[in-house]
Amino acid sequence: MNSMKGKLVVVTGPTSGIGKKIASDIGNMDANLVLACRDINKGRQVAEEIIQRNNTAIIDVMHIDMSDIQSIKEFACQFRKKYSRLDVLVNNAGVNLTGKERQNSVQGIELTFATNVLGYYLLTCELLELLKSNGSARIVNVASTFANDVNLDDVQFEHRPYDAMKAYAQSKACDRMLTWAFARRLENSGVTSNAMAPGLTPDTGLFRSMPVKRRLELSKGGGRSIEDGADTAVWLASSSETDGISGKFFEKRQEIACEFRDVEAEEKLWSICEELTGYKKYAASNRKCQ
Ligand SMILES: NC(=O)c1ccc[n+]([C@@H]2O[C@H](COP(=O)([O-])OP(=O)(O)OC[C@H]3O[C@@H](n4cnc5c(N)ncnc54)[C@H](OP(=O)(O)O)[C@@H]3O)[C@@H](O)[C@H]2O)c1
């Protein structure tokens, strides 16, 4: 096992499924962990479990709601007050909604896009200075091979019928596109930006609304364990084998092709994220922490 002693690592969505396993594995490598979670009690419970296995682990549990622009800004403010650098950011928190009705974030943005895309974008932007100031740092984005239905003229399903599955597939394609857009901007900065796909991992909370029988079928039909689903993200976050590698998409520690490589589309998505989060204006306005 690699040692990550002294490295500061943020994992979003560490309270369940793949993120919990990523956090646990990285905690076992003696990194200083920040568990960025929407439910502080669940986060504390995960921290205790990690410390029970490795009593030298140093863990900070911080609140963030990845669907809420204001909450992400507040998290970043608190983070910058506490820490002066960041070695690894693992963007993992995500939702796969069910139901026929479109759900919105507190800012009125379609909830899947807000959480899975704007969340990844804004948190990364907010922590970028700390990542860059490090000289060498890593961004790991948990994406998916289940990716499709990108419509950059209608990311929020305002002009096409809302479909939760399509919203999820679009969001996961967008996670990859943002990864490439960050990698381009971070070339020669020492900060790498990669995406990974866990593979179908039916035992996580993402499938909580699926009947148990169907989940069992998926598990038997080639579904992956949570441990295997998390493995590539842990490898990208920690291994010397991935030093300096950037702008790539991995599954089972192997680079795989990404069908969503299109600089023009990636930049259009970037502008959409900039616009919907108001990040450009906010960053230029000498942001103040409460
Ligand atoms: N499972 C799969 O087959 C699969 C396949 C490909 C990609 N992925 C990706 O893997 C990642 C993790 O999913 P999972 O399968 O491990 O699902 P999961 O067990 O449901 O875990 C999702 C995590 O994200 C957190 N989260 C959700 N919404 C949030 C919000 N608004 N703010 C902060 N945290 C939030 C959850 O917190 P709570 O504990 O509070 O709910 C939980 O910790 C996702 O990005 C997903 O798209 C999963």
Image (cartoon, rainbow, N blue to C red):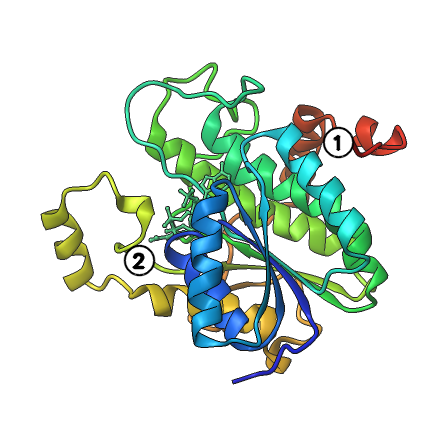
Of the residues shown, which amino acid type is indicated by label 2? Thr
Q: Secondary structure at mark 1?
A: helix
Of the residues shown, which amino acid type is indicated by label 1? Tyr
**Residue at image location 60% in from the left, 82% down from the top:** 3
Give x and y (percent) for residue 118: 60, 35
Q: Which residue is mark 2?
A: 201
Direction left: furthest residue = 213
Q: Which residue is mark 1?
A: 279
Of labels 1 and 2, earlier in sequence is: 2
Q: Locate the C terminus and report the quarter of the image it occupies.
A: top right
Classify residue 286 as left or right of residue 267: right
Tag shown at residue 131 = none
Classify residue 142 as left or right of residue 86: left
**Between 51 and 255, the one nearer to me in the picture:** 51
- Between the residue at mark 1 and the residue at mark 2, the CA separation in whole angstroms equals 33 Å
Direction bottom: furthest residue = 1
| Disc 2 C-beta below 8 A from ligand 1 | yes
**Residue at image location 9% in from the left, 49% down from the top:** 213
Q: Is residue 103 above or below residue 22?
A: above
